Image (cartoon, helix red, strand yellow):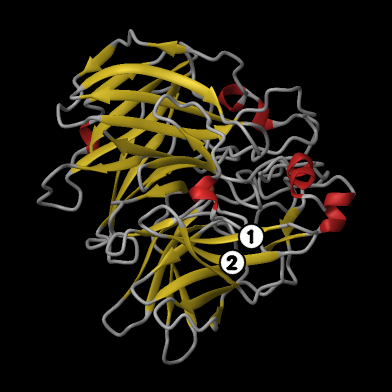
């Protein structure tokens, strides 16, 4: 199938034809025509705004100069409520420019091209809106406009991913990518060099059609997450969301040695599950691999419109024992949470701190809290947002000349139900419990979306 045609059908991106099957999920909710992911602050916005007069409550730290960007789905047409999936629709960027502690402007802009609606990253002085499953990364300028230049100087010959991992030593970006170029499933380990060009794209021995949303790196390995959600052309052809829970597929985590580059993946079987997002992975002193991620017991089984109504995502650690070849699993926290972030330079190294968005434990998520994890002490801190407010992925921005790993800021958009608008909210990451140090009031709401980045000036 032609890639554009595939993307148009699936909307991924990924999203797609979803028919919510009638059935009881864990919470006893019977599926119906109501689509949770088109309501409230999930609903798309139509207005494209540039605003340079922004009211600020509190004060923005003077050391902050840059651009906060976030991507997310924003279907501009009239999606079929029964079939719409949250991962579907045009990408829309929401950005705030900050200069030495002053908020200069807010803008939102649609992303051009193949519905690159999942993440926006910067690398080698370029900014790209990115998505998995074959959509081409779209270069974005500092004003949030989509450019038409070929991504990575025309060197990308495979699909790309919504989640790359920066090796802070080599300044290379690693990604596990997949695409559907000719109706077949191809997965690659792709490396973008520090010059912004693709310098490796190794075909992976993987044909299961697993949904490869994320990867992780350690000092010696790239991690491949071959989990319990798989793609089916049959489902796509019959109008269903093409990725769904697959009880028959053995979930496993693979280690690809990135030093020897031998193409051999060492697999560790794990219990059935899925996770979109890792906090991090690293090797312990014995050379075993630890990976922390937000684990779903099951999803995309009954609910074909989105991820949240079947089981809550829980922070879980897998330990991969290189000597025995076995994996063990341990739930680390009891607060449902998604969109984990941490220090941007610690991919593959032990991270003491992590941050996430609490999703609540009700039958439908509420994003009413920001969580900070201390993995050395095995504790969490929680900041409950004011009633009627819900946050988004908290991005950690390290201070200059850090003395401690958590010295820096958390930035996230927070939606306020009463005003039906959003704020860009900044926390001191060392003291989230005392609440925001600055709130930049935006002229409109920022729909719940996915991922973003701080692009330093
Ligand atoms: Fe993601």
For the residues labelled 1 and 2, say whether their Cβ atoms are less than 8 Å apart: yes
Residue 359 shows up from this direction: no
Percent coordinates x, y for residue 370 in the rendering = 36, 39
In the displayed structure, does residue 68 sit left or right of residue 21? Answer: left
Q: Position of residue 384 (x, y in %)?
A: 35, 33
For residue 188, the mark is: 2
Q: Residues within 10 Å of mark 1 (few under 14, many from 20)?
A: many
Position of 323 relative to 95 (above/below): below
Nearest the eye: 370 or 27: 370
**Disc 1 marks which residue?**
178
**Residue 12 or residue 332, whichever sits in front:** 12
| Element class at badge 2 | strand
101 lies above or below 71:
above
Query: With respect to residue 257, does 364 lie above or below?
Result: above
On the rendered image, what quadrant is the C terminus found in? top left
Q: How many numbered marks are there? A: 2
Query: Badge 2 local density, few (<14 within 10 Å), some, or many (20+)?
Result: many
Picture quadrant where residue 65 is located: top left
Rounded to the nearest whole Å, what is the CA distance between mark 1 and mark 2? Answer: 6 Å
């Amino acid at each position: 199938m032609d890639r554009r045609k595939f993307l148009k059908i699936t909307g991924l991106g990924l999203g797609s034809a979803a028919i919510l099957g009638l059935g009881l999920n864990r919470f006893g909710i019977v599926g119906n025509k109501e689509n949770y992911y088109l309501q409230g602050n999930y609903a798309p916005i139509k207005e494209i705004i540039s605003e340079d007069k922004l009211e600020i409550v509190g004060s923005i730290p003077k050391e902050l100069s840059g651009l906060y960007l976030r991507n997310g789905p924003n279907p501009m047409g009239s999606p079929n409520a029964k079939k719409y999936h949250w991962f579907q629709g045009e990408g829309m960027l929401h950005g705030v420019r900050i200069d030495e502690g002053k908020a200069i402007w807010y803008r939102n802009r649609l992303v051009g091209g193949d519905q690159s609606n999942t993440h926006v990253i910067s690398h080698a002085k370029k900014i790209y809106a990115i998505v998995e499953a074959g959509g081409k990364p779209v270069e974005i300028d500092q004003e949030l406009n989509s450019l038409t230049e070929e991504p990575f100087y025309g060197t990308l010959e495979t699909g790309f991913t919504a989640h790359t991992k920066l090796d802070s030593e080599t300044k290379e970006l690693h990604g596990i990518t997949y695409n559907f170029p000719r109706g077949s499933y191809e997965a690659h380990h792709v490396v973008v060099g520090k010059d912004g060009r693709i310098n490796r794209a190794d075909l992976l021995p993987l044909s299961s059609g697993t949904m490869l949303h994320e990867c992780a790196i350690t000092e010696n390995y790239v991690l491949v997450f071959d989990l319990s959600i798989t793609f089916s052309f049959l489902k796509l052809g019959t109008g269903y969301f093409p990725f769904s829970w697959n009880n028959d597929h053995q979930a496993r985590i693979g280690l690809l040695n990135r030093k020897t580059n031998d193409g051999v993946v060492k697999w560790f079987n794990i219990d059935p599950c899925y996770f979109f997002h890792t906090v991090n992975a690293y090797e312990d002193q014995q050379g075993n691999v630890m990976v922390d991620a937000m684990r779903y017991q099951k999803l995309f089984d009954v609910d074909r419109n989105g991820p949240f109504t079947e089981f809550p995502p829980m922070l879980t650690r897998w330990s991969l024992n290189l000597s025995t070849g076995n994996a063990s699993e341990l739930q680390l926290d009891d607060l449902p949470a998604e969109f984990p972030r941490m220090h941007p330079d610690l991919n593959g190294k032990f991270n003491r701190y992590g941050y996430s968005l609490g999703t609540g434990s009700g039958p439908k998520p509420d994003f009413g809290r920001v969580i900070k994890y201390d993995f050395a002490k095995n504790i969490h801190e929680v900041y409950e947002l004011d009633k009627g407010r819900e946050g988004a992925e908290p991005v950690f921005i390290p201070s200059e000349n850090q003395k401690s790993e958590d010295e820096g800021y958390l930035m996230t958009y927070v939606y306020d139900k009463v005003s039906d608008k959003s704020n860009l909210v900044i926390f001191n990451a060392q003291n989230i419990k005392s609440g925001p140090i600055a709130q930049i009031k935006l002229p409109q709401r920022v729909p719940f979306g996915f991922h973003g980045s701080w692009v330093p000036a």
